[in-house]
Structure formats: structure tokens, C-alpha cells
Amino acid sequence: MDYELMQNGIVKIGDKAPNFEATTTIGNINLEDYKGKWIILFSYPGDFNAICTKEIIEFTMESGIREDILILGLSIDSINSHYAWINEIYQKTGIKVSFPLIADRSSAIGRKYGMISSNINNCETTRNVYIIDKNLTIRAILMYPPEIQRSVNEIFRIFEELKALQK
């Protein structure tokens, strides 16, 4: 299955979430280390973009009231770009981004998850969302084109319903 994922970037609801190691704004992570915790993994086209900034702030506001979920943001931007963007958000709004941003410079994670749309751009991530349960199973997938803002409230509504189903 890993070969198919690497070639086609096809993940489906019910699949085990492909593992990855990544450099983030909180250090290096391995997805397997978060087994036992719900995860929202989302991709975005790039740092310093107005729509992306609004979404990052909305995810931060939601994550501040939840301890039962890990939020992970991903783009192809560098770790230094992520740090500069987080700092700019804090300087302009006073809001501290409270979750890791992944620097996927090679697009390896984006390709593995199908976040790269070759019809749009061969390396920029689209706005995908993967809700992953405690067993690292993909429970929901949402996909948006780069220029459309997603509803963070809707993402958390879906998370709450999926979590309730597993009780």
C-alpha cells in the first residue's frame, strides 16, 4: 500500500494514516507517536497568505479550548518561513499559534496524502483536511481548492460527531 500511496497519493476514509517524520515548529515529530490521540492534519498553500492566516488563527482559537486533539498544519514552506509567519501573527494580533506547522519542503508528505494537485501546481499543497482517530485511521477527508477558505467550525463539527460515534 505504501508504494501506491507514494505513486498516486491516494488515501481513503478507513485507511491507516500513512506515517511520516517531519520537521515542525515544535521540533521533529513522527505521526506514530500520536497514536491514542485524535489528529486534524490540514494543508494550506503557503505562509503569509491572508486566507491561510485567517484559518491558522481560527485553528488556534479552537485548539486553545481542546485538549483531546492534536492539530497539525502543513505547507511546503521552510521552517524559517513558518517561524517568521507565526511571529508576524503574534505581532499583529497577540495570538500565539499553539500547534505545530510542518515544513514539507520536498512535498513528500503532501504527495503521500494526496495534498498536491498536479492540475493546479506540481508542488503547492491544496487545502486538504484529514481527521484521524486514536488508532491512526483516517475518518474524514475534506478537500478545497487553494483559493477557497474552509470552515474551521465545520471541521470541528465533523470531529465531534466522529468522536461521539467511537464512544
Image: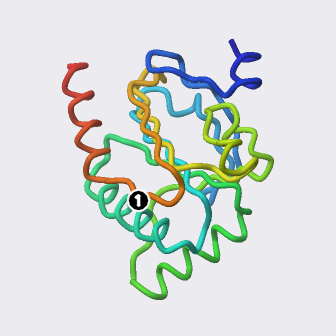
- In the image, 152 versus 84, the foreground residue is 152
Horizontal relation, residue 44 to residue 95: left or right: right
Q: In this view, does 28 lie above or below 59?
A: above
Which residue lies under the disc numbered 1? 149
Q: Quadrant location of residue 48?
A: bottom right
Determine the secondary structure under disc 1: loop
Horizontal relation, residue 156 to residue 148: left or right: left
Amino acid type for the residue under numbered disc 1? Gln
Horizontal relation, residue 54 to residue 108: left or right: left
The residue at 41%/59% (across/down) is 149
The residue at 34%/63% (across/down) is 58
Residue 72 rendering spot, x and y as whole percentages: 51, 48
Residue 47 rendering spot, x and y as whole percentages: 60, 68
Q: Quadrant location of residue 111?
A: top right
Rendered-image quadrant of the N terminus: top right
Residue 152 rendering spot, x and y as whole percentages: 32, 53
Q: Which residue lies furthest to the bottom in this view?
A: 92
Q: Which residue lies furthest to the front in this view?
A: 119
- In the image, 21 versus 51, the foreground residue is 51
Q: Is residue 124 above or below residue 113?
A: below
Residue 56 rendering spot, x and y as whole percentages: 44, 64
Horizontal relation, residue 90 to residue 101: left or right: left
Q: In this view, does 153 lie above or below 130?
A: below
- In the image, 5 versus 17, the foreground residue is 5
Label 1 environment density (alpha carbons within 10 Å; few <14, some 14–19, many ≥20): some
The colour scheme of the drawn protein is rainbow
Rendered-image quadrant of the C terminus: top left
